[in-house]
Amino acid sequence: MRSHSSLRRDTMAWSISDLAKATGIPRSSLYEAIRRGEGPPTHRLGRRFVILAEDLVDWLRALPLVGTQTTTASGSIARNDRPTRSLDGKDNSNGY
């Protein structure tokens, strides 16, 4: 991810291209995640798709934390050592 200065606090909405540039996430990966229903909520603005800043923050906060433990409904402990799938849908079981 690029420096936090790329993610401006005064931005109300992000285009997919601007978000890709600011985060370093490939544009095609963002579109694919949105298509699968795993990306941030998008809104149509004319011909463009935009992501509201508050929706982006909510989506990022909802992503699983890496290296944390959670308790499942059955009471067992599950570790989130690494994501099982990256935004582009590739298997990340080796952690890379």
Image (cartoon, rainbow, N blue to C red):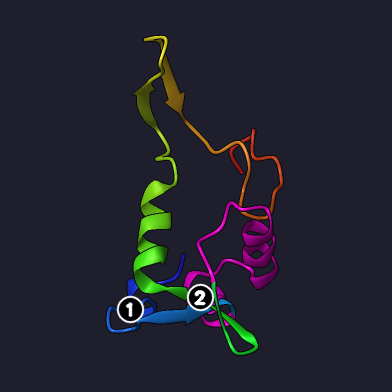
Q: Earlier in the sequence, mark 2 or mark 1?
A: 1
**Looking at the image, residue 85 lies above or below residue 10:** above
Up the image or down, 61 lies above or below 92; here it is: below
Q: Is residue 87 left or right of residue 3?
A: right
Q: What residue is drawn where x is 58% and y is 38%?
A: 95
Q: Name the residue rendered at 39%, 40% in the picture.
A: 65
What's the residue type where badge 2 is placed?
Leu
Residue under label 1: 5
**Number of other residues with Cα within 10 Å of mark 1, as a class: few under 14, some 14 to 19, many 20 or more:** few
**How packed is label 2: few (under 14 Cα within 10 Å), some, or many (20 or more)?**
many
| The C terminus sits in image quarter | top right
Q: Is residue 8 left or right of residue 96?
A: left
Residue 83, position as x, y percentages in the image:
55, 38
Q: Is disc 2 in contact with disc 1, using a CB cutoff of under 8 Å?
A: no
The three-letter amino acid code for the residue at tag 1 is Ser
Tell me the residue at 44%/46% (across/down).
63
Looking at the image, the residue that sits furthest to the bottom is 46
Q: Position of residue 89 (x, y in %)?
A: 70, 49
* Residue 49, quarter of the rendered image: bottom right
Query: Which of pointers 2 and 1 indicates the residue nearer the eye?
Result: 2
Q: Look at the numbered disc 1 and give the secondary structure of its residue.
A: helix
Q: Please state which of residues 86 and 12 is positioned toward the viewer in this rendering.
A: 12
Q: Main secondary structure of the magenta part?
A: helix
Residue at the spot of label 2: 19
Placement of 67 over or under 19, stated as above or below:
above
Secondary structure found at label 2: helix
Residue 71 location, x and y as percent?
36, 19
* Pick the front one: 7 or 33: 33
Q: To which quarter of the image does residue 26 belong?
A: bottom right
Q: Which residues are magenta?
A: 17-42
